[in-house]
Amino acid sequence: MTLHTRKSHFLGTKLRTLRKRNGLTLEELSTRCIQLDSSTAPSVSYLSMIESGKRVPSEEVLGLLAAVFQRAPGWFLDGNPELEAPSPAQRTGGAASVPLEPAFLFSKELLQAAIPELLAQTGTTGRQFAHLLIRSHQEMSRNDFPDLERSAETIGERRFPLGVDDLMRLCKHHGLAIRWFDRQPVLVRDNDHELRSMVRSFYDSPRTVYLNRELQADPARLKFDLASHLGHKVLHGGDGLKSAHATGGEMGGSPESSTGIAAGMSARDVLHAWRDFECSFFAGALLCPKIPFRRFLTRESYRVEAGEGIELTPAVVMRRMTKVSPYPYWHFFDAYPPGYLRAVYRGNGIPLPWGNMARATDPCPNWAVFRMLDDSRGPDRGSQISVLRDGDRSLLYCCHTRRTADMAGNPHVVSVGIDLVPALRSHSVDAEAVVASITDACLHHHGEARIPHEAAELIRGAARVLNIAWVEDALTSAARIICPRSTNCPRSGHCDGAGASRAREITDVREEILSKARGARATG
């Protein structure tokens, strides 16, 4: 085998392995090269020949590939056929599982009897519990619902972007009648806080969609509502078993009258919650079909603001971003003040800073989403790199957060973020050392500090491979330590919002007694 053949073979193998580790297709890699230099960018077929060893790229093409993956050109030519060992297996997202032992206590019959009692005693509605189940299912399945994707792509023929007129035509084609109504916001109580609520739209079986005339001035929300109701017609035959679209509320939806809404659970609760999820997912897939939307995000370097030009809400852009990106380690939050959670996705397993179905009593105020909820006069968008201290672990995340308002004018905050550690590992970086250097800097500066130069450069390189612009944006600001709860704050002085002390728990007393006993034995 000649030196030329060996180099082309090893180069192609390394390029193919690196491309697949970053979740890129040949077409997407070609697009990334075109973004850098359209005159010398390789075609899909030429990239395929490079990977198969049939072609050796020119210096110009090799330079483009090196720039996309933030490698030195010489790395591709060093004659080493093996890429670094794959990174350790990542968590599959969501809350950690627990062993169901002893098994007899978790039998289907016993759970059927115990769950309604549990919900009644804790004041949890069936709708809230159903949404928790759906969230766990969504996180464990990595947000992958191919049947819903296929249905949406069949209906929309993968056209992107779709305008209001396009949605109206699709509704008419599928036999839906549109009726308009007039309704202004009203004040309602949702648990212990008051907010403005407005009915946006609802579906009346078998084929009528009622739309609030206020939606005519808000095409992004109008498109989502039309797409969701169209999904109900396509997926469920328009039987009407679907919640109305309205504003506000905590996890699972909008405020509802307390009449007839009690703790406990019914089959209807679960059915409505699942139907609402299916229709919402369908709407996102229809408005942002996977391949065209992925190309759009690549072109726009994942900037959420790019959705404004094609009449997509920040929430739709963020939620679909977590699905269509080749990088799987994402999270998404949608929260209302003072800290109520409406929607969440944790494909990266990030600990949840909220209580399960109610606001935590001690949220860490340094999470970007809480800072933006609390500071209504500050900037309405921003990016932040955070070290999350969870027990003995230090985790590294980056998020982009936006303050917006719902249709009734209530402020809420949406936030999308990624786990940076897998990206750093994929980029051949000692991720643990990077996290440790940022953690030390923050701990020595009261919980927040500029990212050390070397760590910043390594993160910048990984961000450019991911092609996510707001990760680089976050490097211009201080990194912050965040915690699942402020009472666990590792800072030398408790941050604002955290209690100066907490009640001593039995485990504290136990450890103190055992420590003294061990000390006595050691000296005896």
Image (tube, rainbow, N blue to C red):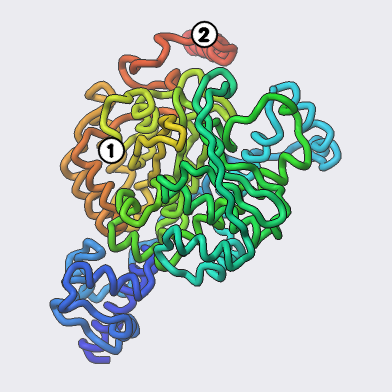
Q: What's the residue type where badge 1 is placed? A: Gly
Q: Is residue 364 above or below residue 323?
A: above
Horizontally, residue 409 falls left or right of residue 194, namely: left
- Helix, strand or loop status at disc 1: strand
Q: Residue at x 35, y 40 (%)?
A: 396
The numbered mark, 1 or 2, whose residue comes first in the sequence reads 1
Q: What's the residue type where badge 2 is placed? A: Ala
Image quadrant occupied by the N terminus: bottom left
- Residue 519 image point, x, y percent: 48, 11
- Residue 177 image point, x, y percent: 61, 57
Q: Residue at x 46, y 33 (%)?
A: 408
Horizontally, residue 23 falls left or right of residue 126, namely: left
Residue 183 visible in rendering: yes
Answer whether labels 1 and 2 touch (C-beta < 8 Å): no
- Helix, strand or loop status at disc 2: loop
- The residue that mark 2 highlights is 503
**Crowd around label 2: few <14 · some 14–19 · many ≥20 (10 Å):** few
Q: Residue at x 36, y 63 (%)?
A: 22
Name which quarter of the figure residue 106 lies in: top right
User: Which mark is nearer the camera, 1 or 2?
Assistant: 1
- The residue that mark 1 highlights is 382
